[in-house]
Image (cartoon, helix red, strand yellow):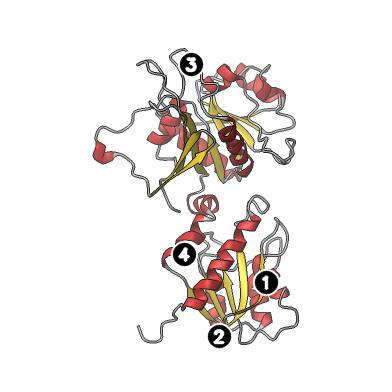
Amino acid sequence: MKGMPIIVDTDKTHLARAIELAQNGAGAVKPNPVVGAVVARGEDVIGEGWHERFGAAHAEVNAIEACGVEDLTDATLYVSLEPCCHEGKTPPCTDAILAAGISRVVIASDDPTEKASGRGLGILRDEGVEVVVAEGELAARARLLNQAFRKHARVGRPWVLFKSAMTLDGKVATRTGDSKWISGEDSRALAHEWRAAVDAVIVGIGTALADDPQLTARPEGTPAAPPYQPRRVVFDTLARLPPTSQLVAAAAEIPLTVVVSRAAARADTDALEAAGAQVLVATGENEPARVRSALEQLGTMGVASVLLEGGPHLAGAFLDAGEIDEVRLFLAPLLLGGSAARDPLEGMGVERISEAMRALTCDCERIGDDLLISARLREW
C-alpha cells in the first residue's frame, strides 16, 4: 500500500542484531523481558545495548548513550521489543527516544502488557517519529525470546516447560518405580541450567515421596544458594509431604509452595505452614481444573515460568488442562520393557488422533549419549 512504512535489508540486519543482543540479558532481568537495541545511520551502527539487569537502564537508553554525542536526528533505533512508555524502575524509554531526536524506530515485537500494548508506539507517532513494526521471521524470533513474559502478561498464568527423560521404548521408570538414572550426566547438568532459568520447579507428591529431592538448581559455575534458586512447588492433594523432607527442611531459605485440595486435613496444612512452607488450595471439579487454579494463583505471585518435572500423573493433568507450552524430552539409549513400566504422560489424554496436540516446531540434538527432543506447542 502506498505510503506504508517498509523494512529493507539494512533494517533486517540491524533488527537481527538487536534480537541477538537481547539474549545477553537472559536470567538477569526477570521479571522484565529481555530487550536489545541498535542505533544506526544507514548501514553504520553508531550505538548498541541491551537490558542488562533488573532495575537498570533499558536497552534503548543504553544504545542511545553508547552513541556518545552523536547527532541522532537522522538515525534509526532498532529494538527487539516495543519501547515502554510508563514510569517504573526507570523513566519511560519513549522519553529517551524523543529527547535524543531519533526520527525513526523499527521494532521486532509488541509488548502485550496493559501498560504498553501499542501505547508507546502511539506516543512516538504523535510526536512525528516514523514507527515500523516488523513481521514474519524476525518478529517470531523476537517473540520467542520472551514467551514466559508474554504468556504471563496475556493470561496471568506462568509459561510451562515440561521436562522428562525416557528410554527408547518410551518409559520413564521401571514397574517398581526406579528411574535413577535414565538420562546421562550431561543431560542432568543441562536440566539444572533450565531450573536456574525459571521462576519455579514443579513436581507431584509421588516424586517428592519417592525421591525426597531438593529441587535446587546446581548448574556448573552458578552459586547453589539463594537468590539463585527457583521456588519449589509440590502438587500434594492431601498434604502428605513430610515435615522431615529435604524440601520442607530448606523452606526457610528457598521458597516452597505446596498445592493442596480442599480435602487436605487442616492439621497437615498447618504443620507445613508452621515449618515455613506456603500452602495454596487449588479448587476445581477435577485435576485439570485444579492445575489451572494453582497456576493462576502462582501467576498472581509473580511466577511467570515453571519447569514441570513430573511425575507422569501430574504431567498428564497438566496436558489435560492444556497448560504445557514446551516439551523437552531426553531420549536415552535404554530399553526397559514391561507393560507396567511408567509412561511420561498419564491423565485422560485424547480419544482420537485428530484431537492430539501438534507441535509447532520440533528439534533434535545430541547431549552426551542421549538425544534431546525439543517441541514448542504454543506461541504467545
Amino acid type at circle 3 is Gly
- Other-residue count near label 4 (Cα within 10 Å), few / some / many at <14 / 14–19 / ≥20: many
Q: Is residue 228 above or below residue 142?
A: above
**First along the sequence among labels 4 and 1:** 1
- Viewer-closest of 159 and 259: 159
Q: Which residue is mark 1?
A: 63
**First along the sequence among labels 4 and 3:** 4
Tell me if I can see residue 85 in this picture.
no
Q: Is residue 54 above or below residue 162?
A: below
Q: What's the distance in space between the residues labelled 2 and 4, CA to CA?
A: 24 Å
- Other-residue count near label 3 (Cα within 10 Å), few / some / many at <14 / 14–19 / ≥20: few
Q: Which residue is mark 4?
A: 139
Q: Which residue is mark 3?
A: 177
**First along the sequence among labels 2 and 1:** 1
Amino acid type at circle 2 is Gly
Quadrant in the picture for the C terminus = bottom left
In what element is the residue under mark 1?
helix
Q: What's the distance in space between the residues labelled 4 and 1, CA to CA?
A: 20 Å
In which quadrant of the rendered view does residue 341 lie?
top left
**First along the sequence among labels 3 and 1:** 1
In what element is the residue under mark 2?
loop
Residue 164, given in percent of the width and then of the height, sits at: 49, 32
Residue shown at the point (66%, 35%) measured from the top left = 217
